[in-house]
């Protein structure tokens, strides 16, 4: 009898969850539950190894990275004195 969960039982559980947590918190709980199930599935199947935070091969570098030419002197030299005389 435990495996026979129909739409009526699911509806009752959802109404109780709505009363307990409220309408503003319920979407956050659903999002967290979905994320947890997704991470669990990836951990079991090993699909999470394919997803990385590294950019794809051939992707442009971030805007704050300055490209340098090998062998070129890319150092910026500061003036030797503050007043500019020397």
Image: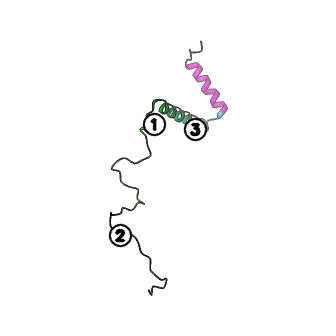
Measured from the top left, where is residue 19 in percent x and y?
66, 30
Within the image, what quadrant is residue 67 found in? bottom left
Residue with the mark numbered 1: 48
Q: What element carries label 3?
A: helix
> Is residue 18 located in the magenta-colored stretch of the structure?
yes
Q: Kindly indicate whether the residue at mark 1 contacts the one at mark 2 (C-beta within 8 angstroms).
A: no
Q: What residue is shown at x 58% (from left), y 22% (from top)?
A: 10
Q: Quadrant of residue 18?
A: top right
The residue most toward the bottom is 85
Whether 67 is drawn above or below 18: the answer is below
1 or 9, which lies in front?
A: 1
Q: Which of marks 1 and 3 is in front?
A: 1
Q: Is residue 7 left or right of residue 50?
A: right
Magenta stretch contains residue 69: no
Query: Which quadrant is the C terminus positioned in?
Result: bottom left
The majority secondary structure of the magenta stretch comes to helix
Q: Where is residue 2 in the image (x, y as percent from the top left)?
A: 59, 15
Which x, y percent locates residue 50? Answer: 41, 38
Label 3 crowd bin: few (<14), some (14–19), many (20+), radius 10 Å: few
Residue annotated with mark 2:
73
23 or 50, nearer to the observer: 50
Are the residues flagged by discs 2 and 3 in contact, CB closer than 8 Å? no
The span from disc 1 to disc 3 (Cα, nearest Å) is: 23 Å
Cα–Cα gap, marks 2 and 1: 42 Å
- Circle 2 sits in a helix, a strand or a loop, which is it? loop
Give the magenta-colored segment's residue range: 1-20
Badge 2 or badge 1: first in the primary sequence: 1
The residues tagged by marks 2 and 3 sit, at their Cα atoms, a distance apart of: 53 Å
Residue 28 bears which disc, if any? 3
Q: What element carries label 1?
A: helix
Question: Left or right: where does residue 63 sit relative to residue 36?
Answer: left
């Amino acid at each position: 009898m435990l495996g026979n969960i129909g739409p009526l039982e699911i509806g009752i559980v959802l109404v109780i969850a709505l009363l307990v947590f409220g309408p503003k918190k319920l979407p956050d709980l659903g999002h967290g539950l979905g994320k947890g199930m997704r991470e669990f599935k990836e951990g079991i199947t090993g699909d999470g190894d394919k997803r990385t935070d590294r950019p794809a091969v051939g992707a442009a570098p971030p805007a704050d990275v300055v490209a340098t030419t090998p062998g070129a002197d890319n150092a910026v030299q500061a003036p030797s004195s503050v007043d500019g005389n020397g």
